Image (spheres, helix red, strand yellow):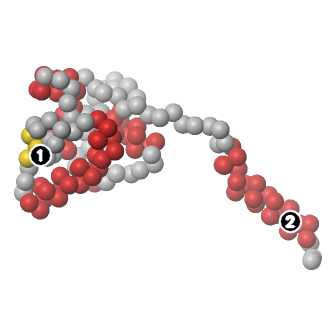
């Protein structure tokens, strides 16, 4: 084999560079993000008598995109704008901007924290107007 030493050295260098990110991150864990609950959530306390989302917290963490997709289909295809919560039985307006964003008003502190951590790029803001961040909102 001609120049076998150079070929083997090249392969070793290539493998070292290719696997460097894995070796570098062994044992390191990113902190799980905790979305901040804004003062706007207190509005739901006035409205319902307690902090309440359309469904329980664990359901919303797991299934919020399924719920929002179902809402979109129901509003666009069936012209149905009312959602009855299975957990509380209360009725909500099926609207990201006019219902969800009333309490979860900071995209940066609420939505982006988990979506960045999970490396997902939701397409909500392709159609909806992205909420403006208030001056002095902390990250």
Read off the residue under disc 2.
8
The answer to whether 59 is drawn above or below residue 12 in the figure is: above
Residue 22 visible? The answer is yes
Read off the residue under disc 1.
83
Q: Quadrant of residue 79?
A: bottom left
Nearer mark to the viewer, of 2 and 1: 1
Taking the image as shown, residue 77 lies to the left or right of residue 124, namely left
The answer to whether 49 is drawn above or below residue 63 in the figure is: above
Element type where label 1 sits in the image? strand
Q: Please tell me which residue lies in front, 98 or 93.
A: 93
First of labels 2, 1 by sequence position:
2
Q: How far from the left and from the top, in percent, is residue 21?
A: 66, 49
Taking the image as shown, residue 138 lies to the left or right of residue 64, namely right
Q: Quadrant of the N terminus?
A: bottom right
Q: How far from the left and from the top, in percent, is residue 20?
A: 70, 50
Q: Residue at x 65, y 38 (%)?
A: 27
Q: Quadrant of residue 95?
A: top left
In the image, which disc is placed on residue 17?
Answer: none
Q: Quadrant of the C terminus?
A: top left
Distance between mark 2 and mark 1 Cα atoms:
64 Å
């Amino acid at each position: 084999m001609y120049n076998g030493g150079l070929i083997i050295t090249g392969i070793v260098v290539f493998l070292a560079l290719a696997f460097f990110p894995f070796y570098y991150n062994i044992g390191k864990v990113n902190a799980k993000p905790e979305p901040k609950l804004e003062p706007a959530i207190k509005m739901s306390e006035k409205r319902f008598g307690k902090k309440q989302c359309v469904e329980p917290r664990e359901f919303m963490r797991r299934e919020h995109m399924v719920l929002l997709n179902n809402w979109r289909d129901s509003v666009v295809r069936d012209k149905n704008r009312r959602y009855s919560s299975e957990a509380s039985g209360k009725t909500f307006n099926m609207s990201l901007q006019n219902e969800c964003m009333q309490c979860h008003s900071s995209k940066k502190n609420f939505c982006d924290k988990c979506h960045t951590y999970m490396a997902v790029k939701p397409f909500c803001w392709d159609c909806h107007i992205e909420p403006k961040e208030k001056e002095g909102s902390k990250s």
